[in-house]
Structure formats: C-alpha cells, structure tokens
Image (cartoon, helix red, strand yellow):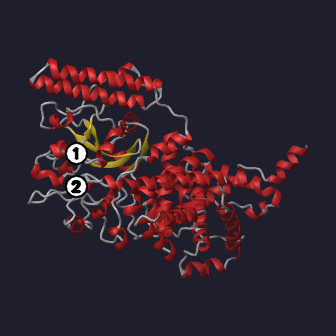
Amino acid sequence: MSGSDRALVAQAQSGERAALDELLRDHYDRIYAICRRITGNNADAADATQEALMSIVQGLSKFDNRAAFSTWSYRVATNACLDELRRRKRLPTPALVDEHHGWVDQNINDLAPAFDDQLVLRDEIQAALEQVPEEFRAPVILRDCAGLNYAEIAETLGIPPGTVRSRIARGRTKLAEIMRTGNQSPADKRQNNQS
Amino acid sequence: MKLLPPNADELVSAYLDGQAAPDEVALVESSPDLMERVNALRSLSNLLGGLLEAPPEQKETHISAALDAFDSLFSSTATVNQSTAPLSAALPPAATEASLAGPHFAKITSLRSAREQRRPRRFNSGIIAAAAAATLLFVALASFGLGGNDSLETADRANGTASSFSIASNDTADEASPDYAASDNVLIDPKSSAASTLAGPLRPVEALAEEAMSDEQDPAENIAESEKTEVGDATTIDPDSHELDSHSDESLDLVLTDSDAPVLLNADRFVYLGPFPSQKSLLLELEPLSNESLVKRAEPFESGLFPNCRQHGVLELANIETPTLIGQALVLGQVVEIHQITGDDDAITFLIVDATDCVVLPTTP
C-alpha cells in the first residue's frame, strides 16, 4: 500500500471527508476501467462502479490495511461487477477454452493500430473480451487493467497464485484467438466497407 | 519452426508479467519464437490496459454520492446510543490505531438512494398504502379478536404478510401479485419463544435502519438480559471484550465453547452474495441453489466488511450446533445474513437475518 493511500485511509477512517474524496478520485478511473472491462458496457459499468464506491465507503471502517487499498478496492469493484452481471443475467456463455489448444499463429502486432483505428480496435478488444469465459477474463483484467500482481489477483479472486498464472495465460490466449479469428481488423473492415 | 514447450503460452504470459522463474526467463529469452509471442502479447496487454474513462459528470456524481453516504455515516454517530460500543471495537487486531480511535461507524442506507438517483423510482405508493392498511387490519385482529397461541400465530401471520407486502411495494408492480403478497409461510414456529420477538408490528427492512440508530429499545432487547451482550448486533458488543481478537485467527465459522460463550464468526470466510432489490429476489436466487453450488459460487470476501451476527445470538439458531451461516447480502442496502437450516427430511430452509439486530426477518419463500 502506498504511504499516501495508507495515510488517506487512516484519515478517512477517522472521519476526514477530504481524505476519502482524494482516495476515491485517485482510484476512480481504475475502478471504472475494471468495471467497464468486466461488465462490457457503460451502463452496467456505471452501476457497478457506484456499488463499488458505496461498498468501499461502507467497508472502510473495517478495512484493516492487510492489503493495499488499491487491491482491496479493486476486489470490491470486481465483486460488484460480477454481482451486476449476475443480476442482469448478462453473463456470456462461451465454450470453455481447450486445455492445450495451440498458439495463435498470427502475430497480434499485425493489428498494430493507426491512431484512427485505435477506437475501433478498443471496441473490438472489448467485444473479444466478452467472449472470454469469466473465470479467465477476470484475472486478465485484474492484471492488464488493474495492474495487480499474481498474488494480489489470487487474493482478490480467492484462487491460488498458480491458478492465476494459468488462467491469465489461457485468458490471453483465448483473447488473441478471438481477435484473430472472430474479429476483423480495422483495415479489413475499411476495405470491406469500401467495396 | 522449432518445437515449442507445451506450456509456451503460460511461459510467455508469466514472462510478460515478470512472474516467470529464472530458468523460465532464460528459456523464453533464448527462443526467438517465444520472444515474438511476448511482443505480441505485450501489444494485446497494452491495448487491454488502456483506460476506459468514465464521463466526467458520472465520476463527479458517483464520488459525490459516495461522499454523501460517508457524511450520513458520520452524522448518524450522534444518534448512536452512548451505552453501546463502536463497531470499530469489532475490528481485527491489524486495524489501524486511527480506525480504532475513529468515530462510530453505523450502517449506511444510502446505497439504495444512490441507485434510485440513477434509476426510475419504482415505488408504488398505492401498494404501500395497501400494505399499511392490511397490516393494521391484521394487528387489530390479533389484538382484539384472538387470544393465546392463536393470537401469536395470527400476529405471526400478520407479520409475515406484512413483510410480503413490504417486499412487493419495493418491487415492480407486476411482481406484487396477490398470490405472492398473500403468502404467509413464516419460517418461525409461532409457538416458539421466538414468536414473542417476531410477533410485533410491521418492521419493514427500511425501518430496521432507523431502529438501529435510535435510542429506543432494540428488538434484540427482548432477549433475556443475560444474553444481551451476546447478541450479534455489533453495537452491543462489549467494548472491553477481547473476544474477537482472541479468536480472529481461528478457522472456525462458529463454535460454542464449553462456557457457552459465543465465538464470533470468522469474517474471512464469509460469502458475499451481492445486493438484491428485495428479500424476494434474494430468496429466488437462493432457492434453486444446492448447498454445493452455493459453496462453489462463494467468493471469499474482504474480511470485516460487514458486521455480523453470532449464531448464538439469533434466537432461532441458538440451539443449532452446526454452523448455519452461508453468506451475507444487501437487501435494499440493508446488510442481511443468510442462514441455512437443514431439516430432518433434508429440506433446506433459508433464514434471512437482519445483521443489525440479529433478528430473523419474516420471509415468504
């Protein structure tokens, strides 16, 4: 936990509104990004983010500093997102990833985006992400979006670190596969649109 | 093309994250193919890690709502009974000195109001009025028309029916079907001692929050005086008690010691089932699930997020030796605990317990 966060948490726990304000602002963008990635749409992400903030406020008095505030808040956010998905019955149900399926031959660098392609690509990666089973998606998001290390992800999701490692690998592999086979590249799309 | 190791995906992924062992690092770096994969994954990872920014006004609204909840949390401390201990007394030993010295943290109820700010209000005032009228009618019948055990039973029915009405009033109108609203399948044996606690007037979930923060007699005070401090309501925990500290590392969910003193539940093992708009929706979620599937979907929750009841302090559960708690949830922003009782015929019954005063809420399964 950063010293800054620790100090802010202590101040917020003792009732300093400004400290909580700063704490929430510091982490809001990351919490929202996690929620956006997990839920897959703005509306659910907004609801989940709101729920997460409320849960953080509600649980702050009992936050015991055993984990970093960021880890704890991302964990709360992840739970809020999964709850949101359950509540709205929007869990995608893709086929499970094969245990030992092959690597994606096409280099993802082939998709190296021009600036004007980035927005499209961002949508595509989100669409692809939604096809990755939740059990693999959440660790990937917590790693690549929240920047948590394996131990923190393990703590957040309540799974062993070794499982985190394999799930992230499988999630990324699945994601790359979907990006390669399931989504057209922006260049292809442009070409198709022109023709 | 060189033959790659079977766990190449995992090797590359771990290498990218800096989580590979030294021999794995050496293996990856010695292989151009693997390094190519690393670069490919890095591109993907960077794309994924790009922040998806929320609209600024949404950010302000969310933070503002959270701060409002924080304010209400602290403003409520003024109304907390001074004879009660702060919830911070129930903090784990690792809690900071600042948090222990902080003011009372009471339950907040602004989660629901925050939701309502974002969503169309779905209250049907007509249904609420009907619920109130029906409740009064039942209470009146119970008070004047009946006596003895019948009186208790009728009062219980009134309570159960009122509960279902209050649930319906918080759901969409189409959920408030007469069949559902008329259901009075109260879980509590009306002839048990618990009936005297439960056979009170309508206590909608929302009212519990106000009761918890008022100086008026807590429903839990109906429990024998000797058990008073054993009720799981965190506001009744003896501030001088070190019971929590002494047991916080135990792996048991709940045990009854030789001295019959209750041991607090280990919050590390709680299962958070999420927020629900009503008791009905919570029960609907629970009922199709077997115990096994509940365990499977269990997500370890950050320790100590919520106060919790002790099984010993819940009248209906006090005589059950096996742990009954399966999780916690939020119903309309109210923290509740879900306890599961397995009958002699293996029938499963869920009890929803108000986590504020550890009183079983009348339910209509």
Q: Say few, some or many: other residues with alpha carbon within 10 Å of mark 2 (under 14 / 14 to 19 / 20 or more).
A: many
Q: Is residue A71 left or right of residue B221?
A: right
**In the rendered image, is residue A140 in sight?**
no
- Which residue is farthest front? B78
Instruction: Give the residue number, with chain letter if any, for mark 1.
Output: B218
| Image spot of residue A29 (x, y percent) | 61, 60
Tag 1 subunit: B
Image quadrant occupied by the C terminus of chain A: top right
Check disc 1 and report its element: helix, strand or loop: loop
Answer with mark 2 or mark 1, whichever residue precedes in sequence.
1
Seen in the picture, residue B237 relative to A67 is either above or below; the reply is above
Q: CA distance from mark 2 to mark 1?
A: 10 Å
Label 1 environment density (alpha carbons within 10 Å; few <14, some 14–19, many ≥20): some
Name the amino acid type tagged 2.
Thr
Q: Residue furthest right?
A: A195
Name the residue rendered at 51%, 40% in the picture. B116
Q: Position of residue B347 (x, y in %)?
A: 24, 35
For disc 2, the chain is B
Please tell me whether residue A21 is drawn above or below residue B148 in the rendered image.
below
Toward the viewer: A147 or B39?
A147
Q: Which residue is mark 2?
A: B236
Mark 2 touching mark 1, by CB under 8 A? yes
Amino acid marked by disc 1: Asp
Rendering quarter of residue B60: bottom right
Considering the numbered disc 2 on the image, is that residue within a helix, a strand or a loop?
helix
Q: Toward the viewer: B339 or B127?
A: B127
Residue B340 visible in the shown view: yes
